Amino acid sequence: MSFLNTVGTIAKSALNSMNEYNAEMQALKQEMEAKSSSELRDIVKNTGFFGSSDKQRKMAYIVLKQRGEV
């Protein structure tokens, strides 16, 4: 039984991590949708050390694509 308990614990942990990631990405998408297209283009282009994170760049690109500007 301890094996099944361990598997259950791992599955719950994985599900919680996925839910947290989805909530983070949803919040980021809402943040990006509130920005103008020029701001989103700047985010996509900003790849420097102090630039936008990969998640921000990806979400900005997705929003631009949804707007039909890519």
Image (cartoon, rainbow, N blue to C red):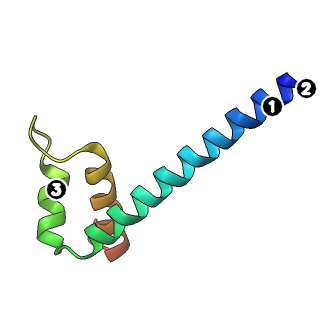
Q: Amino acid at mark 3?
A: Ile
Q: Return the residue at label 1.
A: 5
Label 2–label 1 contact, CB within 8 A: yes
The image quadrant that residue 49 belongs to is top left
Return the x and y of residue 28 as percentages of the image width and height. Answer: 33, 62
- Nearer-N-terminus badge (1/3): 1
Return the x and y of residue 58 as percentages of the image width and height. Answer: 32, 52
Query: 42 and 29: which one is in front?
Result: 29
Q: Alpha-carbon distance for marks 2 and 3?
A: 50 Å
Q: Return the residue at label 2.
A: 1
Query: 62 and 9: which one is in front?
Result: 9
Q: Return the residue at label 3.
A: 43
Q: Amino acid at mark 2?
A: Met
Return the x and y of residue 4 as percentages of the image width and height. Answer: 85, 29
Q: Measured along the vertical axis of the image, is residue 7 above or below residue 20?
A: above
Mark 2 or 3: in front is 2
Q: Kindly state the secondary structure of the residue where label 2 is placed.
A: loop
Q: Amino acid at mark 1?
A: Asn
Q: Is residue 34 left or right of residue 5?
A: left
